[in-house]
Image (tube, coloured by chain):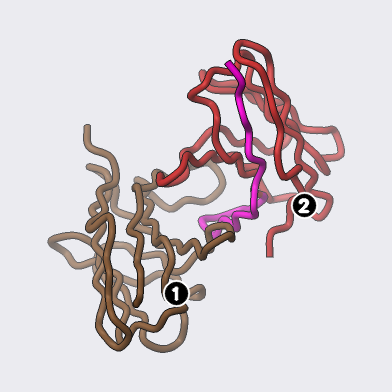
Amino acid sequence: DAKTTQPNSMESNEEEPVHLPCNHSTISGTDYIHWYRQLPSQGPEYVIHGLTSNVNNRMASLAIAEDRKSSTLILHRATLRDAAVYYCIQGSNYKLTFGKGTLLTVNP
Amino acid sequence: NAGVMQNPRHLVRRRGQEARLRCSPMKGHSHVYWYRQLPEEGLKFMVYLQKENIIDESGMPKERFSAEFPKEGPSILRIQQVVRGDSAAYFCASSPGWTATNEKLFFGSGTQLSVL
């Protein structure tokens, strides 16, 4: 069973920032927080992952709460190509358990 | 720079037939993982293989399902005597080494299996 909690859906406008929340209150000390996204009829695509510190890459930023029980994926300027299901996953190895994720809609 | 290649993209089988799903990992990757996505559900881990070795098959159903990753050629997920409940999207992922905490998985586009 998925251990994280995410909103079912969120909506954003193009070129605006998007903050996708995730709760992982049962996270252990060795669990990383992974984010993947999936477009229709495609496999998941890696977005970002982190352990304790905030992380940045060319796709997004990951802000991790100090107690590690929640995190937020930040897309700085949403584009239409960012419309997808976003999965927040806690785990420490290859056995990633995907929940139902957040369906992000981006309006032009 | 080809990504993870899966074929076929769509596979239709009648109940009782065998299904063979193929996965070629990214160049330079020696670790392969199979995941299954049932309708309206998230992906679930099935099996982790290295060349000629099954490392972890804890997510595989005990019967009818098997996987291999031979020394030469793609990884194969085999489902014998398929039933309607096997209808799902099957995704393969690869990584260059053991995915502990700091490696990402590269996923293929999946094989959609439909059992009539």
Q: Colour of chain A?
A: red
Question: Quick check: A27 above or below A64?
Answer: below
Does the magenta-highlighted stretch encompass residue A98?
Answer: yes
- In this rendering, do the residues under marks 1 and 2 share a single chain? no
Q: Chain of mark 2?
A: A
Mark 2 lies on a secondary structure that is: loop
Q: Please give the range of residues in magenta.
A: A90-108
Q: Chain of mark 1?
A: B
Q: Position of residue B6 (x, y in %)?
A: 26, 53
The reply to whether the C-beta atoms of the residues labelled 1 and 2 are less than 8 Å apart is: no
Amino acid bearing label 2: Ile
State the residue lying farthest toward the left.
B72
Does the magenta-highlighted stretch encompass residue B38?
Answer: no
Question: Which residue is found at the position 78% from the left and 48% from the top?
Answer: A24
Question: Which residue is found at the position 39% from the left and 43% from the top?
Answer: B106
Question: Which residue is found at the position 25% from the left and 48% from the top?
Answer: B5
Gap between marks 1 and 2 measured at Cα: 24 Å
Front residue (pair B96, B67): B67
What is the quadrant of the C terminus of chain A in the image?
top right
Q: Colour of chain B?
A: brown
Does residue B11 appear to the left or right of A13 in the view shown? left
Does residue A52 appear to the left or right of A104 in the view shown? right
Question: Which residue is found at the position 72% from the left and 45% from the top?
Answer: A8
Provide the residue designation for mark 2. Answer: A27
Q: Position of residue A54 (x, y in %)?
A: 70, 26
Q: Position of residue B60 (x, y in %)?
A: 46, 76
- Labelled disc at residue B99: none
Q: Quadrant of residue A49?
A: top right
Provide the residue designation for mark 1. Answer: B57
Question: Quick check: A32 above or below B35?
Answer: above
